[in-house]
Amino acid sequence: MGDAENSDFSVVFVLADGEESLIKVSAHQARALVVLAHTGLSADASDATAVRTVLALKGLDPPLKGHVVIELMDVDNRSIVELIGDPLVETVVSHDIIGRLMVREGVIVDPFVHFN
């Protein structure tokens, strides 16, 4: 791994509150943005925040150049975010992925199976 000063890759963590914060950290120049779900809120409230974030990113002036990955908590909200953010946004539903992995790996045990 190379020296961070000589690298073209850098990671910036920002807890942004509104469009002004996104402009201040030059979000419009980022190659990629990852928007994490707000785990302190309900799934619907967290996803509503994600929708507002997508709208703020799309409204940036100068316009956003990079790719955006949005973490959602409810799979039912995926189509809304993709409709608003297309083609800029890709969604990831963390609960859905974890559930699928658990089923795939057989982690979920049938509660009606008894072991002797």
Image: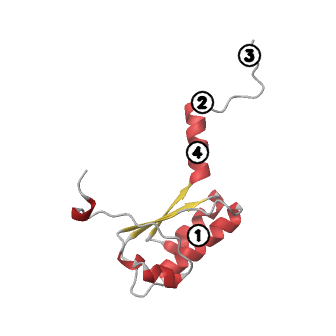
Q: Residue at x 61, y 43 (%)?
A: 99
In the rendered structure, which disc, 2 or 4, sits on the residue that comes first in sequence?
Answer: 4
Q: Which residue does the image show at 53% across and 68% down from the upper left?
A: 82
Mark 1 nearby-residue class (10 Å; few <14, some 14–19, many ≥20): many
Q: Could you tell me which residue is drawn at 39 percent across and 86 percent down?
A: 62
Which is more N-terminal, label 3 or label 2? 2
Closer-to-camera residue (17/55): 17
Q: Secondary structure at mark 2?
A: loop
**Residue identifier under label 4:** 98
Question: In this view of the protein, which residue sits in the foreground, 65 or 83?
Answer: 65
Q: Which residue is mark 3?
A: 115
- Asked if the residue at tag 4 contacts the one at tag 3, i.e. Cβ–Cβ closer than 8 Å, the answer is no
Type of amino acid at the residue the image marks with label 4:
Ile
Q: Which residue is mark 1?
A: 50
Disc 2/disc 3 C-alpha distance (Å): 16 Å
Crowding at dot 4, Cα within 10 Å, few <14 / some 14-19 / many 20+, comes out as few
Query: In which quadrant of the rendered view does residue 31 lie?
Result: bottom left
C-alpha separation, residue under disc 1 versus residue under disc 4: 20 Å
Q: Closer to the N terminus: mark 3 or mark 4?
A: 4
Nearest to N terminus: mark 1 or mark 3: 1
Looking at the rendered structure, the kind of residue marked 1 is Ala
Percent position of residue 58, x then y: 48, 80
Whole-number angstrom distance, CA of label 1 to CA of label 3: 44 Å
Q: Is residue 40 above or below residue 86?
A: above
